[in-house]
């Protein structure tokens, strides 16, 4: 029974290796020129992912070019920037400020920290619990 198991295991391994080598030879290697031509065609059709891993590729629109002048676009962008409507670099959504700004001065915060330090209420560096 043990020799039968070894025979079956050997045949299974041989079949797997034969299949892998046959499938590896089925696709011929692509030359550098062919790869460059494929990449250029994908770039022209808008199928490449932008640098930095941004959004997935979108098909280029077939609309007519904009009738706005460069100065009009720049003015519109400046207004959107002042209103905080532009997304920061990297493609994430604009950040909205939550809560109210602090009314304490730097000196007030320093006093509070000093008092907490004297009482032993500060958490030490590294996130451990206070003593």
Image: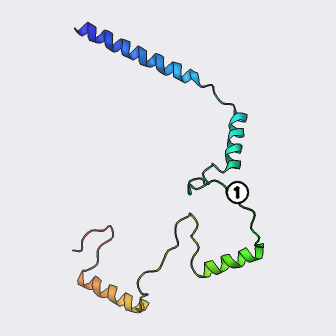
Residue at position x 48%, y 21% from top? 20
Residue at position x 52%, y 69% from top? 93
107 and 2: which is toward the camera = 2
Q: Report the side of 109 relative to 56 (left or right).
A: left
Query: Percent position (x, y) of residue 87?
Result: 57, 70
Q: Is residue 103 above or below residue 14?
A: below
Query: Percent position (x, y) of residue 14?
Result: 41, 14
Q: Quadrant of residue 37?
A: top right
Q: Quadrant of residue 73?
A: bottom right
Residue at position x 57%, y 21% from top? 25
Residue at position x 42%, y 19% from top? 16
Query: Percent position (x, y) of residue 26?
Result: 57, 22
19 and 116: which is toward the camera = 19
Label 1 CA crowd tier, 10 Å (few <14, some 14–19, many 20+): few
Q: Quadrant of the N terminus?
A: top left
Q: Quadrant of the C terminus?
A: bottom left
Q: Report the side of 56 relative to 112 (left or right).
A: right
Query: Percent position (x, y) of residue 95?
Result: 50, 74
Could you tell me which secondary element the residue under label 1 belongs to?
loop
102 and 24: which is toward the camera = 24
> What residue does disc 1 label?
62
Q: Is residue 43 above or below residue 115?
A: above
- Total labels drawn: 1
Colour style of the rendered protein structure: rainbow
Residue extending farthest to the front is 63
Q: Quadrant of residue 110?
A: bottom left
Q: Report the side of 74 relative to 103 (left or right).
A: right
């Amino acid at each position: 029974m043990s020799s039968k198991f070894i025979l079956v295991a050997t045949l299974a391994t041989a079949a797997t290796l034969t299949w892998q080598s046959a499938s590896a030879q089925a696709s011929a290697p692509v030359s550098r020129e062919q790869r460059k031509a494929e990449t250029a065609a994908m770039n022209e059709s808008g199928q490449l992912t932008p640098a930095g891993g941004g959004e997935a590729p979108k098909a280029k629109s077939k609309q007519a070019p904009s009738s706005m002048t460069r100065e009009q676009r720049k003015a519109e962008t400046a207004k959107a920037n002042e209103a905080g409507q532009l997304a920061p670099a990297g493609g994430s959504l604009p950040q909205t400020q939550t809560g109210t700004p602090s009314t304490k001065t730097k000196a007030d915060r320093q006093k509070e920290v000093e008092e907490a330090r004297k009482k032993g209420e500060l958490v030490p560096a590294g996130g451990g619990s206070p003593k």
